Image (cartoon, rainbow, N blue to C red):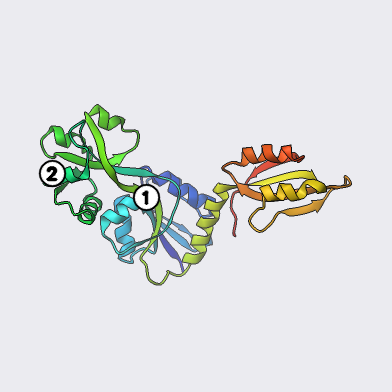
Amino acid sequence: MTIRIALPNKGSLSEAASEILREAGYRQRRDTKELALVDADNDAEFFYLRPRDIALYVGEGTLDVGVTGRDLLLDSGAKAEEVMSLGFGRSRFHFAGPAGRYSSLEELAGLRIATSYVGVVEDFLFRHGIDATVTRLDGAVETSIQLGVADVIADVVETGSTLRAAGLAVFGEVILDSEAVLITRGGEAPEGFEVFRRRIEGVLVARSYVMMDYDIEESNLAGATALAPGLEGPTISPLGKAGWVAVRVMVPRAGSQRLMDELWSLGARAILLTDIHACRL
């Protein structure tokens, strides 16, 4: 049975979502005007939709799986569930108002808040017991305060330069940390989903690890494997040079250069790092 997958058709999540699928071995569109693509070799069909609509299609069961932002999933109120985070498209939501005017969440009571994410903001306010009016605006919400539509805004903040240009500053705690997520309708997993998820997980692990090879004297092997034990232990092979062995081990990408220095200090030589394109653990 073919699994039906929703992907963002444009925006910041689109290319990164397609790239992770390519790395997982699935065909992806070459023309951004294509709205659907069938990958018969992998029993998959892809639909390229507005990111804001993906959670609704998946929640209704029209499509089996989707890639969207956590912010869009929560804002939609759809009957879809986050399965895993995908490590790209990270963003952070804050309240912002005229610089120097507000400093705490309690000051939001009774104010007008403009945002493109009404569901997210209303849920946050409810959980914190704050009564305020939330208005949906699509597009640049920063101007809503200057135009008298709102007292404060709730929006994605990256560098903060756009807010500063509008004379605004963030205040209070973070509303939401968002990133790209894999979603399904929940309940019983659709047929073919476990294979699809394993492929995605394999890409995420491959992006986080590298393969390290090195040669070392057997007398120093215990210290080296203590530094880099691998997932289930290293692969160790004898070398033609008496008393030496070759070691292969998966290590986290982060810190791998420092690890090379430490292994060198232990006597390891011919140390190599190789990218991993995919894996199954």
| Figure quadrant of the C terminus | bottom right
Q: Residue at x 52, y 52 (%)?
A: 204
Task: Determine which quarter of the picture holds residue 2.
Answer: bottom left
Q: Residue at x 25, y 38 (%)?
A: 171
Task: Determine which quarter of the picture holds residue 47.
Answer: bottom left
- Residue 197 at what x, y percent from top left? 49, 61
Kindly identify the amino acid type of the residue bearing the numbered disc 2: Arg
Q: Nearer the viewer, residue 184 or 154?
A: 154
- Residue beneath label 2, please? 112
Q: Nearer the viewer, residue 270 or 23?
A: 270
Lateral position of residue 228 relative to residue 186, left or right: right
Task: Determine which quarter of the picture holds residue 74.
Answer: bottom left
Position of residue 51 relative to residue 65, above or below, is: above
Lateral position of residue 8 relative to residue 151, left or right: right
Q: Residues within 10 Å of mark 1 (few under 14, many from 20)?
A: many
- Residue 118 at what x, y percent from top left? 21, 50
Q: CA distance from mark 2 to mark 1?
A: 31 Å
Q: Secondary structure at mark 2?
A: strand
- Residue beneath label 1, please? 8
Q: Nearer the viewer, residue 158 or 218?
A: 218
Q: Residue at x 73, y 37 (%)?
A: 265
Lateral position of residue 224 relative to residue 171, left or right: right
Kindly identify the amino acid type of the residue bearing the numbered disc 1: Pro
Q: Nearer the viewer, residue 55 or 48?
A: 55
Q: Residue at x 21, y 52 (%)?
A: 125
- Residue 49 at what x, y percent from top left? 34, 52
Whether residue 29 can be seen here: no
The tag earlier along the polypeptide, 2 or 1, is 1
Q: Residues within 10 Å of mark 2 (few under 14, many from 20)?
A: some
